Amino acid sequence: MTRTAAVHEAVLDRHADLLEAVLACADWVADSWDSEGTTDRAAVVDPFEHALEHTGVHRRLPAVLVTAVDAIGGSLSAEPVAAPPYVTVTSRGPVLRATLETDRLVLTVRAFDVERDPTRYVRGATAVEDVLGVEFRSR
């Protein structure tokens, strides 16, 4: 099994409920728009971050990072917290980062997508199985 697959499987096994909660927050944000999308980044990030914090989801996100690193036999140099550089809420969704010995692990919960022509934010993945992006980047 690849490292990417190991992380994906471990996170889905242990944190599917948390990913579902992220998606529920994204649904709430998208439901507040006047149409199926918005061109206003602030109409995505600000209410999404508020919803994640209000529901307690935001503070639980570092546990996902711990599970991901454990799944590949890695270790974190410090206990991750629900703040940068470990956890950031972007216009696409929460991004979790861990610096490993040889590279960097980046998890993206893809709750929103960006469409082009015209450029606008729209609701992203709706299924837990499809929402998690796993990348290993060089340091």
Image (spheres, rainbow, N blue to C red):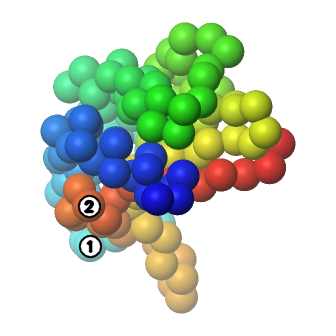
Instruction: Tell me the quadrant of the picture where the C terminus can be found.
Output: top right
Residue at x 53%, y 17% (from the top left corner): 80
Residue at x 45%, y 37% (from the top left corner): 71
Q: Which residue has dot 2 on it?
A: 129
Q: Which residue has dot 1 on it?
A: 36
Q: Secondary structure at mark 1?
A: loop
Asked if residue 123 lies left or right of residue 65, the reply is left
2 or 1: mark nearer the eye: 2
- Is residue 37 depicted above or below 62 in this figure? below
Asked whether residue 29 is in view, the answer is no
In the picture, residue 75 is in which quadrant? top right
Q: Amino acid at mark 1?
A: Glu
Which residue is more in the foreground, 9 or 117?
9
Asked if residue 82 lies left or right of residue 13, the reply is right
Residue at x 70%, y 31% (from the top left corner): 99
On the image, the x and y values in percent for residue 76 come to 61, 20
- Is residue 84 depicted above or below 39 in this figure? above
Q: Secondary structure at mark 2?
A: helix
